[in-house]
Amino acid sequence: MNNLNDITLAEARDGLSRGDYTSVELTEAHIRAIEAARDLNSFITETPNVALERAKASDVRRAGGNPLGGLDGIPIAAKDLFCTEGVKTTAGSHILDGFIPPYESTVTQNLRNAGAVMLGKTNMDEFAMGSANITSYFGAVKNPWSIDDGKDRVPGGSSGGSAAAIAAHLAIAATGSDTGGSIRQPASFTGIVGMKPTYGRCSRWGMVAFASSLDQAGPMTRTVQDAAIMLKFMAGYDPKDSTSINKTIPDFESAMNGNIKGLRIGIPTEYRLDGLSSEVDNLWKQGVDLLKQAGAEPVEISLPHTKYALPTYYIVAPAEASSNLARYDGVRYGLRVPGDSLDEMYENTRGAGFGKEVRRRIMIGTYVLSAGYYDAYYVKAMKLRTLILQEFQQAFESVDVMLTPTAPSAAFAIGERMDDPIQMYLNDVFTVPASLAGLPAISVPSGLSGDGLPLGLHLITKPFDEETLFRVAGVLEEAVKFTAQPSYLRGFS
Protein backbone atom coordinates (compact mmCIF):
# COMPACT_ATOMS: atom_id res chain seq x y z
CA MET A 1 0.00 0.00 0.00
CA ASN A 2 0.94 3.60 -0.45
CA ASN A 3 2.78 4.94 2.62
CA LEU A 4 -0.02 7.43 3.20
CA ASN A 5 -2.23 4.50 4.19
CA ASP A 6 0.20 3.38 6.87
CA ILE A 7 0.41 6.54 8.95
CA THR A 8 -1.31 7.09 12.28
CA LEU A 9 -3.73 9.89 13.07
CA ALA A 10 -1.05 11.78 14.99
CA GLU A 11 1.37 11.40 12.07
CA ALA A 12 -1.28 12.56 9.60
CA ARG A 13 -2.03 15.61 11.75
CA ASP A 14 1.65 16.55 11.90
CA GLY A 15 2.32 15.74 8.23
CA LEU A 16 -0.55 17.92 7.07
CA SER A 17 0.68 20.71 9.32
CA ARG A 18 4.18 20.49 7.80
CA GLY A 19 2.80 20.41 4.27
CA ASP A 20 4.23 16.96 3.50
CA TYR A 21 1.00 16.15 1.63
CA THR A 22 -2.46 17.59 1.18
CA SER A 23 -5.73 16.32 2.57
CA VAL A 24 -6.81 15.47 -0.97
CA GLU A 25 -3.72 13.30 -1.46
CA LEU A 26 -4.30 11.60 1.88
CA THR A 27 -7.99 11.08 1.16
CA GLU A 28 -7.42 9.78 -2.37
CA ALA A 29 -4.97 7.19 -1.03
CA HIS A 30 -7.63 5.89 1.35
CA ILE A 31 -10.38 5.93 -1.29
CA ARG A 32 -8.17 3.78 -3.55
CA ALA A 33 -7.50 1.41 -0.66
CA ILE A 34 -11.24 1.06 0.07
CA GLU A 35 -11.98 0.31 -3.58
CA ALA A 36 -9.25 -2.34 -3.67
CA ALA A 37 -10.48 -4.02 -0.47
CA ARG A 38 -14.20 -4.40 -1.14
CA ASP A 39 -13.88 -8.15 -0.58
CA LEU A 40 -13.61 -7.37 3.16
CA ASN A 41 -17.13 -5.85 3.02
CA SER A 42 -16.12 -3.36 5.70
CA PHE A 43 -18.22 -0.51 4.27
CA ILE A 44 -21.96 -0.39 3.66
CA THR A 45 -21.81 3.02 1.98
CA GLU A 46 -18.71 4.60 0.47
CA THR A 47 -18.74 8.40 0.19
CA PRO A 48 -15.77 9.34 -2.02
CA ASN A 49 -17.43 12.49 -3.36
CA VAL A 50 -18.26 13.75 0.13
CA ALA A 51 -14.74 12.89 1.27
CA LEU A 52 -13.01 14.73 -1.58
CA GLU A 53 -15.27 17.76 -1.19
CA ARG A 54 -14.39 18.04 2.51
CA ALA A 55 -10.70 17.32 1.82
CA LYS A 56 -10.55 20.12 -0.75
CA ALA A 57 -12.25 22.50 1.69
CA SER A 58 -9.67 21.58 4.32
CA ASP A 59 -6.80 22.26 1.92
CA VAL A 60 -8.33 25.65 1.06
CA ARG A 61 -8.60 26.53 4.75
CA ARG A 62 -5.02 25.50 5.37
CA ALA A 63 -3.64 27.34 2.35
CA GLY A 64 -5.54 30.50 3.28
CA GLY A 65 -4.27 30.55 6.85
CA ASN A 66 -7.80 30.12 8.20
CA PRO A 67 -8.53 28.56 11.59
CA LEU A 68 -8.22 24.77 11.51
CA GLY A 69 -9.92 22.07 13.52
CA GLY A 70 -7.97 19.51 15.49
CA LEU A 71 -8.68 16.79 12.89
CA ASP A 72 -8.62 19.03 9.85
CA GLY A 73 -8.20 17.06 6.63
CA ILE A 74 -7.89 13.62 8.25
CA PRO A 75 -9.91 10.83 6.56
CA ILE A 76 -11.97 8.71 8.95
CA ALA A 77 -14.94 6.33 8.76
CA ALA A 78 -18.23 6.30 10.68
CA LYS A 79 -20.09 3.23 11.91
CA ASP A 80 -23.41 3.03 10.10
CA LEU A 81 -25.54 3.72 13.17
CA PHE A 82 -24.43 7.35 13.36
CA CYS A 83 -26.96 9.38 11.40
CA THR A 84 -25.27 11.41 8.67
CA GLU A 85 -27.13 14.20 6.92
CA GLY A 86 -27.83 13.29 3.30
CA VAL A 87 -25.98 9.96 3.53
CA LYS A 88 -27.75 6.62 3.91
CA THR A 89 -27.80 5.26 7.46
CA THR A 90 -29.00 1.67 7.93
CA ALA A 91 -27.65 0.29 11.25
CA GLY A 92 -26.94 -2.83 9.18
CA SER A 93 -30.67 -3.56 8.87
CA HIS A 94 -33.03 -4.11 5.94
CA ILE A 95 -35.72 -2.21 7.81
CA LEU A 96 -33.64 0.99 7.43
CA ASP A 97 -32.32 0.24 3.95
CA GLY A 98 -32.65 3.48 1.98
CA PHE A 99 -33.10 5.73 5.04
CA ILE A 100 -31.34 9.05 4.45
CA PRO A 101 -31.36 11.22 7.60
CA PRO A 102 -32.07 14.94 7.27
CA TYR A 103 -29.81 15.59 10.27
CA GLU A 104 -26.34 14.75 11.62
CA SER A 105 -25.57 12.87 14.84
CA THR A 106 -23.82 14.97 17.46
CA VAL A 107 -20.68 12.80 17.43
CA THR A 108 -20.21 12.94 13.65
CA GLN A 109 -21.06 16.65 13.68
CA ASN A 110 -18.37 17.21 16.32
CA LEU A 111 -15.85 15.38 14.14
CA ARG A 112 -16.99 17.31 11.08
CA ASN A 113 -16.60 20.58 13.01
CA ALA A 114 -13.04 19.48 13.84
CA GLY A 115 -12.34 19.18 10.10
CA ALA A 116 -12.44 15.39 9.74
CA VAL A 117 -13.14 13.93 6.31
CA MET A 118 -15.75 11.14 6.12
CA LEU A 119 -14.78 8.24 3.84
CA GLY A 120 -18.00 6.30 4.33
CA LYS A 121 -20.25 4.30 6.64
CA THR A 122 -18.88 1.04 7.99
CA ASN A 123 -20.64 -2.31 8.20
CA MET A 124 -21.92 -3.59 11.53
CA ASP A 125 -24.05 -6.26 13.14
CA GLU A 126 -27.71 -5.41 12.64
CA PHE A 127 -28.73 -2.76 15.19
CA ALA A 128 -25.39 -3.49 16.92
CA MET A 129 -26.68 -6.90 18.04
CA GLY A 130 -23.83 -9.34 17.58
CA SER A 131 -20.25 -10.20 18.43
CA ALA A 132 -18.99 -11.30 15.02
CA ASN A 133 -20.37 -8.90 12.37
CA ILE A 134 -22.30 -11.72 10.74
CA THR A 135 -25.84 -10.45 11.41
CA SER A 136 -25.66 -7.47 9.02
CA TYR A 137 -28.28 -7.43 6.24
CA PHE A 138 -25.43 -6.35 3.97
CA GLY A 139 -23.36 -9.46 4.61
CA ALA A 140 -20.56 -10.55 6.91
CA VAL A 141 -17.36 -8.55 7.29
CA LYS A 142 -14.06 -10.38 6.86
CA ASN A 143 -11.22 -9.88 9.32
CA PRO A 144 -8.01 -8.75 7.55
CA TRP A 145 -6.18 -11.28 9.76
CA SER A 146 -6.18 -14.90 8.63
CA ILE A 147 -4.22 -18.12 9.05
CA ASP A 148 -3.39 -20.92 6.65
CA ASP A 149 -6.56 -22.96 7.09
CA GLY A 150 -8.54 -21.49 4.21
CA LYS A 151 -11.16 -19.95 6.50
CA ASP A 152 -12.03 -16.28 6.79
CA ARG A 153 -12.15 -14.94 10.35
CA VAL A 154 -14.79 -12.73 11.92
CA PRO A 155 -13.64 -9.20 12.88
CA GLY A 156 -15.73 -9.19 16.05
CA GLY A 157 -18.81 -7.11 16.54
CA SER A 158 -20.77 -5.13 16.42
CA SER A 159 -18.25 -2.50 15.21
CA GLY A 160 -16.53 -5.05 12.97
CA GLY A 161 -16.60 -2.91 9.84
CA SER A 162 -14.80 -0.05 11.58
CA ALA A 163 -12.27 -2.48 13.10
CA ALA A 164 -11.57 -4.20 9.77
CA ALA A 165 -11.22 -0.85 7.97
CA ILE A 166 -8.61 0.38 10.44
CA ALA A 167 -6.71 -2.92 10.58
CA ALA A 168 -6.58 -3.04 6.76
CA HIS A 169 -5.45 0.62 6.62
CA LEU A 170 -8.57 1.74 4.74
CA ALA A 171 -9.20 4.55 7.25
CA ILE A 172 -6.94 6.31 9.73
CA ALA A 173 -9.57 6.11 12.46
CA ALA A 174 -13.27 5.35 12.85
CA THR A 175 -16.17 5.80 15.18
CA GLY A 176 -17.61 2.76 16.92
CA SER A 177 -20.32 2.19 19.46
CA ASP A 178 -20.13 -0.03 22.51
CA THR A 179 -23.14 -1.50 24.30
CA GLY A 180 -21.56 -4.58 25.86
CA GLY A 181 -18.14 -4.70 24.20
CA SER A 182 -18.83 -3.74 20.59
CA ILE A 183 -15.76 -1.50 20.33
CA ARG A 184 -13.35 -3.41 22.53
CA GLN A 185 -13.95 -7.00 21.40
CA PRO A 186 -13.52 -6.28 17.65
CA ALA A 187 -10.43 -4.23 18.52
CA SER A 188 -8.97 -7.33 20.17
CA PHE A 189 -9.89 -9.54 17.20
CA THR A 190 -8.27 -7.19 14.65
CA GLY A 191 -5.18 -5.97 16.51
CA ILE A 192 -6.22 -2.34 16.92
CA VAL A 193 -7.08 -0.01 19.82
CA GLY A 194 -10.74 0.32 20.82
CA MET A 195 -11.90 2.62 23.59
CA LYS A 196 -15.29 2.95 25.33
CA PRO A 197 -15.63 6.24 27.23
CA THR A 198 -17.62 6.74 30.41
CA TYR A 199 -21.36 6.56 29.75
CA GLY A 200 -22.44 10.14 29.11
CA ARG A 201 -19.04 11.38 27.89
CA CYS A 202 -20.19 11.26 24.22
CA SER A 203 -23.65 12.23 23.10
CA ARG A 204 -26.03 9.52 21.93
CA TRP A 205 -28.15 11.99 19.95
CA GLY A 206 -28.44 10.82 16.35
CA MET A 207 -27.15 7.32 17.12
CA VAL A 208 -29.56 4.55 16.16
CA ALA A 209 -30.46 3.13 19.57
CA PHE A 210 -30.00 -0.44 20.74
CA ALA A 211 -30.01 -0.22 24.57
CA SER A 212 -30.18 3.40 25.68
CA SER A 213 -28.73 2.94 29.19
CA LEU A 214 -25.68 1.16 27.74
CA ASP A 215 -24.93 2.55 24.25
CA GLN A 216 -21.84 4.74 24.10
CA ALA A 217 -19.82 6.08 21.17
CA GLY A 218 -16.06 5.73 21.17
CA PRO A 219 -12.93 5.87 18.99
CA MET A 220 -11.28 2.99 17.12
CA THR A 221 -7.70 3.64 16.02
CA ARG A 222 -4.32 2.00 15.49
CA THR A 223 -2.64 3.57 18.55
CA VAL A 224 -3.59 4.69 22.04
CA GLN A 225 -2.44 8.23 21.27
CA ASP A 226 -4.77 8.32 18.26
CA ALA A 227 -7.70 7.20 20.44
CA ALA A 228 -6.93 9.99 22.91
CA ILE A 229 -6.87 12.56 20.10
CA MET A 230 -10.06 11.24 18.53
CA LEU A 231 -12.03 11.15 21.78
CA LYS A 232 -11.26 14.79 22.51
CA PHE A 233 -13.22 15.77 19.41
CA MET A 234 -16.00 13.18 19.75
CA ALA A 235 -16.86 14.05 23.35
CA GLY A 236 -18.76 16.97 24.81
CA TYR A 237 -21.94 18.00 26.53
CA ASP A 238 -25.08 17.89 24.41
CA PRO A 239 -28.38 19.30 25.72
CA LYS A 240 -30.20 17.17 23.13
CA ASP A 241 -29.16 14.03 25.04
CA SER A 242 -30.60 13.81 28.56
CA THR A 243 -27.83 11.38 29.59
CA SER A 244 -25.02 13.65 28.40
CA ILE A 245 -22.76 14.85 31.22
CA ASN A 246 -21.72 18.49 31.39
CA LYS A 247 -18.06 18.09 32.31
CA THR A 248 -14.91 19.72 31.03
CA ILE A 249 -13.16 17.64 28.36
CA PRO A 250 -9.56 17.06 29.45
CA ASP A 251 -6.61 16.97 27.05
CA PHE A 252 -6.45 13.17 26.95
CA GLU A 253 -3.33 13.19 24.77
CA SER A 254 -1.36 15.29 27.26
CA ALA A 255 -2.32 12.88 30.04
CA MET A 256 -0.14 10.22 28.39
CA ASN A 257 3.04 11.16 30.25
CA GLY A 258 4.41 7.61 30.50
CA ASN A 259 4.53 7.66 34.30
CA ILE A 260 2.47 5.04 36.15
CA LYS A 261 4.75 4.64 39.17
CA GLY A 262 2.75 3.99 42.30
CA LEU A 263 -0.53 3.27 40.51
CA ARG A 264 -2.36 0.23 41.85
CA ILE A 265 -3.51 -2.23 39.18
CA GLY A 266 -6.48 -4.38 40.19
CA ILE A 267 -6.51 -7.98 38.96
CA PRO A 268 -10.05 -9.36 39.39
CA THR A 269 -9.97 -12.96 40.61
CA GLU A 270 -13.37 -13.74 39.08
CA TYR A 271 -12.10 -13.03 35.56
CA ARG A 272 -10.07 -16.26 35.70
CA LEU A 273 -12.86 -18.26 34.15
CA ASP A 274 -13.05 -22.02 33.92
CA GLY A 275 -11.83 -23.01 30.50
CA LEU A 276 -9.92 -19.76 29.86
CA SER A 277 -7.31 -20.62 27.26
CA SER A 278 -3.74 -20.82 28.50
CA GLU A 279 -2.54 -18.36 25.84
CA VAL A 280 -5.03 -15.70 26.98
CA ASP A 281 -4.16 -16.37 30.63
CA ASN A 282 -0.41 -16.15 29.87
CA LEU A 283 -0.92 -12.89 27.97
CA TRP A 284 -2.77 -11.50 30.99
CA LYS A 285 0.09 -12.50 33.31
CA GLN A 286 2.57 -10.91 30.92
CA GLY A 287 0.55 -7.67 30.98
CA VAL A 288 0.63 -7.67 34.79
CA ASP A 289 4.42 -8.15 34.73
CA LEU A 290 4.94 -5.36 32.21
CA LEU A 291 2.93 -2.85 34.24
CA LYS A 292 4.77 -3.95 37.39
CA GLN A 293 8.12 -3.34 35.64
CA ALA A 294 6.86 0.15 34.74
CA GLY A 295 6.36 0.92 38.44
CA ALA A 296 2.74 -0.04 39.03
CA GLU A 297 1.63 -2.29 41.88
CA PRO A 298 -0.57 -5.29 41.01
CA VAL A 299 -3.33 -5.96 43.56
CA GLU A 300 -5.62 -8.99 43.62
CA ILE A 301 -9.24 -7.85 43.94
CA SER A 302 -12.60 -9.59 44.08
CA LEU A 303 -15.72 -8.73 42.08
CA PRO A 304 -17.98 -11.61 43.14
CA HIS A 305 -21.03 -10.53 41.15
CA THR A 306 -19.05 -10.64 37.89
CA LYS A 307 -20.47 -14.11 37.18
CA TYR A 308 -23.93 -12.56 36.93
CA ALA A 309 -22.90 -9.77 34.54
CA LEU A 310 -23.54 -11.61 31.28
CA PRO A 311 -27.04 -12.90 32.14
CA THR A 312 -27.87 -9.47 33.58
CA TYR A 313 -26.78 -7.81 30.34
CA TYR A 314 -28.80 -10.22 28.21
CA ILE A 315 -31.94 -9.27 30.12
CA VAL A 316 -31.40 -5.50 30.35
CA ALA A 317 -30.17 -4.93 26.78
CA PRO A 318 -32.93 -6.92 24.99
CA ALA A 319 -35.55 -5.30 27.22
CA GLU A 320 -34.41 -1.84 26.14
CA ALA A 321 -34.09 -3.01 22.53
CA SER A 322 -37.67 -4.28 22.45
CA SER A 323 -38.79 -0.79 23.44
CA ASN A 324 -36.41 1.14 21.17
CA LEU A 325 -37.14 -0.94 18.09
CA ALA A 326 -40.90 -0.57 18.43
CA ARG A 327 -40.58 2.62 16.37
CA TYR A 328 -39.79 0.61 13.20
CA ASP A 329 -43.32 -0.03 12.00
CA GLY A 330 -43.23 0.74 8.27
CA VAL A 331 -45.26 3.92 8.71
CA ARG A 332 -42.83 6.80 9.11
CA TYR A 333 -39.56 5.76 7.43
CA GLY A 334 -37.62 2.78 6.17
CA LEU A 335 -39.04 -0.46 4.80
CA ARG A 336 -42.79 -0.98 4.36
CA VAL A 337 -44.31 -4.34 3.40
CA PRO A 338 -48.04 -3.97 2.58
CA GLY A 339 -50.77 -5.97 4.33
CA ASP A 340 -54.54 -6.22 4.27
CA SER A 341 -54.74 -4.37 7.60
CA LEU A 342 -52.59 -2.03 9.66
CA ASP A 343 -51.65 -4.86 12.03
CA GLU A 344 -50.72 -7.10 9.13
CA MET A 345 -48.60 -4.34 7.60
CA TYR A 346 -46.75 -4.00 10.93
CA GLU A 347 -46.20 -7.75 11.13
CA ASN A 348 -45.08 -8.07 7.51
CA THR A 349 -42.73 -5.10 7.75
CA ARG A 350 -41.07 -6.17 10.98
CA GLY A 351 -40.90 -9.82 9.94
CA ALA A 352 -39.16 -8.96 6.67
CA GLY A 353 -37.15 -6.03 7.98
CA PHE A 354 -35.52 -7.52 11.07
CA GLY A 355 -32.98 -10.33 10.92
CA LYS A 356 -33.02 -13.50 13.02
CA GLU A 357 -30.82 -12.21 15.87
CA VAL A 358 -32.72 -8.93 16.19
CA ARG A 359 -36.04 -10.79 16.26
CA ARG A 360 -34.62 -13.12 18.93
CA ARG A 361 -33.60 -10.22 21.15
CA ILE A 362 -36.87 -8.33 20.68
CA MET A 363 -38.72 -11.48 21.75
CA ILE A 364 -36.46 -11.97 24.78
CA GLY A 365 -36.89 -8.33 25.75
CA THR A 366 -40.66 -8.41 25.34
CA TYR A 367 -40.81 -11.59 27.42
CA VAL A 368 -38.80 -10.25 30.36
CA LEU A 369 -40.90 -7.06 30.40
CA SER A 370 -44.23 -8.90 30.26
CA ALA A 371 -46.55 -8.72 33.23
CA GLY A 372 -45.91 -12.25 34.46
CA TYR A 373 -42.13 -12.11 34.29
CA TYR A 374 -41.15 -8.46 34.88
CA ASP A 375 -40.29 -8.96 38.57
CA ALA A 376 -38.66 -12.35 38.07
CA TYR A 377 -36.31 -11.18 35.32
CA TYR A 378 -36.06 -7.46 34.62
CA VAL A 379 -36.33 -6.16 38.19
CA LYS A 380 -33.88 -8.79 39.41
CA ALA A 381 -31.44 -7.91 36.63
CA MET A 382 -31.59 -4.22 37.53
CA LYS A 383 -30.82 -5.06 41.17
CA LEU A 384 -27.83 -7.12 40.05
CA ARG A 385 -26.67 -4.26 37.85
CA THR A 386 -26.66 -2.01 40.91
CA LEU A 387 -24.63 -4.57 42.87
CA ILE A 388 -22.10 -4.86 40.03
CA LEU A 389 -21.71 -1.06 39.98
CA GLN A 390 -21.28 -0.95 43.76
CA GLU A 391 -18.56 -3.61 43.61
CA PHE A 392 -16.63 -1.57 41.06
CA GLN A 393 -17.01 1.54 43.21
CA GLN A 394 -15.67 -0.31 46.26
CA ALA A 395 -12.78 -1.77 44.28
CA PHE A 396 -11.76 1.65 42.96
CA GLU A 397 -11.33 2.84 46.53
CA SER A 398 -8.19 0.67 46.66
CA VAL A 399 -7.02 0.49 43.03
CA ASP A 400 -6.58 3.01 40.22
CA VAL A 401 -7.16 0.79 37.20
CA MET A 402 -8.09 -2.82 36.45
CA LEU A 403 -6.44 -5.15 33.95
CA THR A 404 -8.25 -8.10 32.35
CA PRO A 405 -8.25 -9.92 29.01
CA THR A 406 -10.47 -8.32 26.37
CA ALA A 407 -11.91 -11.51 24.91
CA PRO A 408 -11.69 -15.19 25.88
CA SER A 409 -10.22 -16.19 22.50
CA ALA A 410 -8.79 -14.95 19.25
CA ALA A 411 -11.03 -14.41 16.22
CA PHE A 412 -12.92 -17.51 15.14
CA ALA A 413 -13.90 -18.55 11.63
CA ILE A 414 -16.96 -17.11 9.91
CA GLY A 415 -19.71 -19.68 10.28
CA GLU A 416 -18.55 -21.04 13.63
CA ARG A 417 -20.78 -20.57 16.71
CA MET A 418 -23.64 -19.25 14.57
CA ASP A 419 -26.04 -21.96 15.76
CA ASP A 420 -25.21 -21.50 19.44
CA PRO A 421 -26.25 -18.05 20.73
CA ILE A 422 -24.83 -18.75 24.19
CA GLN A 423 -21.34 -19.39 22.81
CA MET A 424 -21.62 -16.20 20.75
CA TYR A 425 -22.74 -14.17 23.77
CA LEU A 426 -19.76 -15.45 25.80
CA ASN A 427 -17.45 -13.39 23.56
CA ASP A 428 -18.47 -10.38 25.67
CA VAL A 429 -17.87 -11.96 29.07
CA PHE A 430 -14.92 -9.67 29.95
CA THR A 431 -16.33 -6.46 28.46
CA VAL A 432 -19.95 -6.51 29.68
CA PRO A 433 -19.29 -5.72 33.39
CA ALA A 434 -17.72 -2.32 32.62
CA SER A 435 -20.63 -1.55 30.28
CA LEU A 436 -23.22 -2.33 32.94
CA ALA A 437 -21.36 0.01 35.32
CA GLY A 438 -20.89 2.75 32.68
CA LEU A 439 -17.10 2.75 33.15
CA PRO A 440 -14.41 3.82 30.66
CA ALA A 441 -12.39 0.93 29.24
CA ILE A 442 -9.91 0.28 26.45
CA SER A 443 -8.53 -2.71 24.55
CA VAL A 444 -4.85 -2.60 23.59
CA PRO A 445 -3.34 -5.11 21.13
CA SER A 446 -0.90 -7.10 23.25
CA GLY A 447 0.15 -10.29 21.55
CA LEU A 448 -0.63 -13.09 19.12
CA SER A 449 -2.31 -16.43 19.61
CA GLY A 450 -0.49 -19.64 18.77
CA ASP A 451 -2.09 -19.42 15.32
CA GLY A 452 -0.80 -15.87 14.81
CA LEU A 453 -4.05 -13.99 15.44
CA PRO A 454 -4.16 -10.84 17.61
CA LEU A 455 -5.16 -10.80 21.27
CA GLY A 456 -5.95 -7.75 23.38
CA LEU A 457 -5.65 -6.71 27.00
CA HIS A 458 -8.37 -4.65 28.63
CA LEU A 459 -8.07 -1.75 31.08
CA ILE A 460 -10.91 -0.24 33.14
CA THR A 461 -10.90 2.93 35.27
CA LYS A 462 -13.45 4.75 37.39
CA PRO A 463 -16.01 7.09 35.80
CA PHE A 464 -14.60 10.08 33.91
CA ASP A 465 -11.01 9.02 34.62
CA GLU A 466 -10.12 8.53 30.96
CA GLU A 467 -6.87 10.39 31.61
CA THR A 468 -5.58 7.56 33.81
CA LEU A 469 -6.95 5.03 31.34
CA PHE A 470 -4.98 6.52 28.45
CA ARG A 471 -1.88 6.96 30.59
CA VAL A 472 -1.76 3.29 31.60
CA ALA A 473 -2.80 2.10 28.14
CA GLY A 474 0.02 4.10 26.58
CA VAL A 475 2.56 2.52 28.93
CA LEU A 476 1.18 -0.96 28.19
CA GLU A 477 1.29 -0.30 24.45
CA GLU A 478 4.90 0.89 24.66
CA ALA A 479 5.93 -2.12 26.75
CA VAL A 480 4.20 -4.67 24.50
CA LYS A 481 5.49 -3.15 21.24
CA PHE A 482 2.85 -4.86 19.12
CA THR A 483 4.03 -4.43 15.52
CA ALA A 484 2.40 -7.40 13.79
CA GLN A 485 0.36 -6.65 10.67
CA PRO A 486 -2.59 -8.56 9.22
CA SER A 487 -1.83 -10.97 6.40
CA TYR A 488 -4.24 -8.99 4.21
CA LEU A 489 -1.83 -6.06 4.05
CA ARG A 490 0.90 -8.21 2.53
CA GLY A 491 -1.15 -8.38 -0.65
CA PHE A 492 -0.78 -4.59 -1.01
CA SER A 493 2.87 -4.24 -0.02
Image (cartoon, helix red, strand yellow):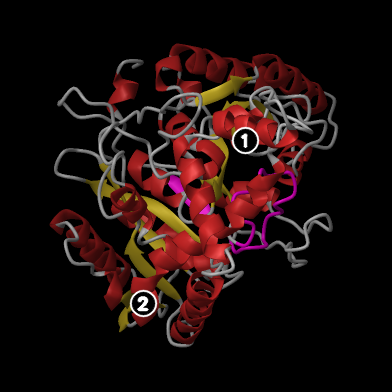
Task: Note whether 49 is above or below 191 in the view shown.
Answer: above
Is residue 237 magenta-colored? no
Q: Residues in magenta? A: 193-213
Front disc: 2 or 1: 1
Q: Is residue 330 left or right of residue 282?
A: right
Is residue 198 magenta-colored? yes
Percent coordinates x, y for residue 93 in the rendering: 57, 31
The quadrant of the rendering that contains the N terminus is top left
Percent coordinates x, y for residue 108 in the rendering: 71, 39
Give the number of marks: 2
Q: Is residue 396 left or right of residue 253?
A: left
Question: What is the quadrant of residue 243 in the picture?
Answer: bottom right
Where disc 1 sits, the SS reads helix
Judging by the rendered image, the residue that carries numbered circle 1 is: 347
Judging by the rendered image, the residue that carries numbered circle 2 is: 266
Percent coordinates x, y for residue 185 in the rendering: 40, 49
Give the dominant element type of the magenta stretch: helix, strand or loop: loop
Task: Note whether 468 is above or below 138 in the view shown.
Answer: below
Question: What is the quadrant of residue 351 in the picture?
Answer: top right
The quadrant of the rendering that contains the C terminus is top left
Q: Which of 478 and 210 lies nearest the eye of the viewer?
A: 210
Marks 2 and 1, Cα distance to the nearest angstrom? 49 Å
Decide: marks 2, 1 in contact (CB < 8 A)?
no
Instruction: Kindly identify the residue that appears in the image at 24 percent across and 68 percent down.
Output: 289
Instruction: Kindly identify the residue that appears in the image at 75 percent across and 18 percent down.
Output: 53
Q: Is residue 242 visible?
A: yes
Q: Amino acid at mark 2?
A: Gly
Considering every residue shown, the one lying at the far front of the view is 340
Instruction: Kindly identify the residue that appears in the image at 27 percent across and 68 percent down.
Output: 288
Q: Is residue 367 left or right of residue 114?
A: left
